Amino acid sequence: MTKHLIIIILLGVLLAVFVVAMQDVQILYNTALKSYLVEGVIPRGFEETGSRNLVTAILLDYRLFDSLFEAGILLIAVSGIIWISKHDIEEKNAQFMYDKFKTPDLFVTFSRLVYPLMLTFGFYVIINGHLSPGGGFQGGAIVASAILILYYIDHDKETNIKLIVTVEKFLYIAILLFAGISIFTRGTFFTNFIPTHYSYDVQTIYLVILNIMIGFKVALGLWAIFTAFLKEGR
Amino acid sequence: MLFIPVYLIFIPVFTALIIYVFKSKYVNYLALVAQFAMTVLLIMYYNAYGDQPDATLFVFGDWDARVGISLYNDRLSLSFMFLTIFTWWMVLIYTFNFRETNEKNDNFLFFLMFLQGVFLGFLQSNDLFNLFVFLELTTILVTILIAFKKTGDAYRAGIYYELINVSGVLFFLIGIIILYNSFGTINVLAIQQLLEGLPDYVALRMAYIFLMIGASVKAALFPLYTWLPKAHGVAQSGISALLSGLVVKGGLYLFIRINDMFSPANYSYSDFFFVVGGITAGVGVMFALSQKDMKQILAYHTVSQVGIMMMGLSSLPTNDLFYGGLYHVFNHALFKSLLFLGAGVIIQAYRTKKVSDIRGVMKTMPVVSVLMIVGMLSITGAPLFNGFISKTIIKYGIYDQEWKYWILFFVNIGTATSFIKMSQIFFGPKPMTILLSETPQRVSMIIIAFSCVILGTFYIPISTGFFGVDLSYVSPFGLLPLYDYIATLTIGFAFYKLVIEKDVKPVRMIREFKVSFETANYLMVIYVVALVTYFIIL
């Protein structure tokens, strides 16, 4: 009890100091320093990258190097989970909700209705990532959850994890290579490879292709992760 | 030439992916080719830019450095990169069985090579969020490598490592958010310039504290070190060597870089981190003395040596004491990986980890014993070996403050005692059945042992070349250092005979003292409050 009391007091002190400290951020932001974000990215982002969605502009152009390794985190997590959850004894493939009677029919029916909608919505979010909120990472997650619903509809669905993971790795290599093309056209790594004197419509080609590749990679990665978990749950 | 840092990050990443995709034993040799190419590239890069760090600033996509991601290399990061590639060479030669291809091998090589690329990126990055991404990736990769054996202990240690480190890294993220809200940029060099001439804001101190917590967790400083013995004790020996030798140093590197970034703000951090380092060193030695598991002993010694490095690095970078700590980082990387690799061979041969059960190593494995002795002499600070140099610089640096000197003195005696205990494995009768080690394992150990001796004797040109400091005032020759060392050993031996060998009750109590996960979290909160108290309230 005393242990808890001490920890609560300590956390209270921390919170108080934190709240006091945060008063300064406003002063710092307003007076001393102008943010480059406000000066540079917001007015010029569209001209420089051809993306109306500035989040995509930052993810796929200004800070593409980060995004590549964020996709890498998922890649590593997938291979790690698959390696760690694998058992030496050969097991049968996952059969989700094997006990058919426990999955309500209503749920299955609605899943059948929702599945194509979710899939379409996922693709929409991926392809329009440069115009509207969304992008490869978000759309990929939506597509993956649509595939997860598929396991409710079809109990006996067989999935070849090995194939998914290999395709995912190839896609990641392709993303890295595609992002690196700009070294030949613009002389620097990880930016839009289409030179800036082309029109914005041409420049969006790069954004759309990269969004699609990232979207598929994320979807495959998440698919592999939950298939591995399903196997583990058996 | 300017793009070499990018190649250094992506060569191992691509190699890892190709090895994973094409599972073939010929493709596995690509790892060695990649390693060789990276060595050549790094030497070329060092020759071109080694003494002009300003020319190495490189922004991806040619954007303004404040919004894009940039890489930056100075002497510090270049020397760390040499160490990284060297350690990976050794671990690859030691652990990897290239003749055999199976899923385990391919996966292992995949994670190992990917970690190298990520670690090299981490060393070069000049962007705080990019550092965060690399820290996160390192944490996940190391978790997988710890849990790679898939035993119960390994899983537990892996999850423990993951949870503690992720919470530390999240603190780091909060620090980044505060800085970004204040400055609108997360470029390290830009923030350093912006801090120039600013009044002392509490928010910036808060950001400094949060970044420091991330670095402290990664470096395993005193209350946050609990993950290290678990993780390094259960991993495979090659991985333990890699983690103890290099990956822990990532936290110290972060510590140096953050202090460098905040150098215009002039926070007086020296005394606080010296005390933290001292306590870390003391606690590490105390637990190491009580342990019986060979790898646990070595892991706790990593904790104590990190404490000694911290005692040096907590000083301002203009002092010689700082370079003592920095030199100790490199020395420790060599001798600790040597000791872990040697322990791996011995454990593999005797099929037990208990120090008291292993006897007669000198007769069964003479080469390995000699190499282990080189490692032990280095870690205890014998003249002519590399540990001596850095410990002597630290000793000179704190000569005028008596209490600091005594901390170092007791840690040295503890280290000597602990390795006298461990050296008992060399004596005794030869056991009946043992497995012999393989040639590649011995080759990598011999190379590391040689570098230990080389860093201990040719330290003057090496330190001028890498750090630009003159260490010629340290001399391993003469009688005084020898007397000093022999006196330390004698006291250590007496302590061993009188206390440790008899296994008195306090020693047993320390050995059975376990830190639960809950306590580790309490300790973390207490550490945060201590930092806040020191830097803000006082």
Image (cartoon, coloured by chain):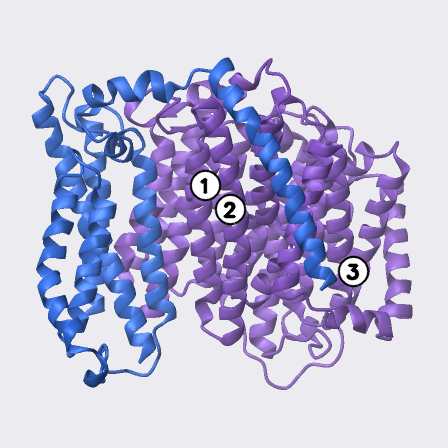
In front: B23, or B151?
Answer: B151
Identify the colour of chain B in the image.
Answer: purple
Q: The disc labelled 2 sits on which kind of residue?
A: Val
Q: Which mark is residue B132?
A: 1
Residue B443, can we see it? no
N-term mark: 3 or 1: 1
**Are discs 3 and 2 less than 8 Å apart at CB?**
no
**Are discs 2 and 1 less than 8 Å apart at CB?**
yes
Q: Which mark is residue A175?
A: none
Q: Residues within 10 Å of mark 2 (few under 14, many from 20)?
A: many
Residue at 85%, 42% in the rendered image: B481
Q: Residues within 10 Å of mark 3 (few under 14, many from 20)?
A: many
Would residue B3 appear left or right of B115 to someone viewing this image? left
Residue marked by disc 2? B169
| Residue at mark 3 shares a chain with residue at mark 2 | yes
Q: The disc labelled 1 sits on which kind of residue?
A: Phe
Estimate the x, y position of residue B300 in percent, counting from the top left: 68, 59
Q: Secondary structure at mark 3?
A: helix
Please give the chain letter of the residue carrying mark 3. Answer: B
Q: Which mark is residue B286?
A: 3
In front: A26, or B503?
Answer: A26
Please give the chain letter of the residue carrying mark 2. Answer: B
Determine the CA span between mark 3 and mark 2: 28 Å
Please give the chain letter of the residue carrying mark 1. Answer: B
**Quadrant location, the C terminus of chain A:** bottom left
Residue at 88%, 31% in the rendered image: B400
The part of the image, by quadrant, that contains residue B504 is bottom right
Identify the colour of chain A in the image.
Answer: blue
Q: Residues within 10 Å of mark 1 (few under 14, many from 20)?
A: many
